[in-house]
Image: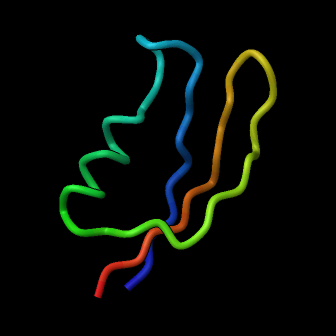
Amino acid sequence: MQKAITVNYQSDKKNNVDELNQLLQEGWKVVSQSPVGLVPMVSSLVILEKN
């Protein structure tokens, strides 16, 4: 099974890195990552996989 999420990071208080960390704790693994954002917000398309 695969899942795609967009991880956004603008500052320590404006981001959704916790969502990615939660998925990793649940056993999902990153299979690819591509930057997609522009300044001032950095965004990354992350493809995750779980067996």
Image-based side of 18 in relation to 45, left or right: left
- Residue at figure coordinates x 47%, y 66% from the top left: 30
Image-based side of 36 in relation to 50, left or right: right
Displayed quadrant of residue 25: bottom left
Q: Find the residue positioned furthest to the right.
A: 38
- What is the basis of the colouring in this image? rainbow
User: Where residue 40 appears, x then y in whole percent?
Assistant: 74, 15
Quadrant housing the C terminus:
bottom left
Vertical comparison of 1 with 33: above or below: below
- Residue at figure coordinates x 59%, y 18% from the top left: 10
Vertical comparison of 6 with 27: above or below: above
Displayed quadrant of residue 3: bottom left
Image-based side of 23 in relation to 15, left or right: left
User: Where residue 6 appears, x then y in whole percent?
Assistant: 56, 48
User: Where residue 41 appears, x then y in whole percent?
Assistant: 68, 22
Q: Find the residue positioned furthest to the left.
A: 26
User: Where residue 49 appears, x then y in whole percent?
Assistant: 41, 77
Vertical comparison of 49 with 17: above or below: below
Quadrant housing the N terminus:
bottom left
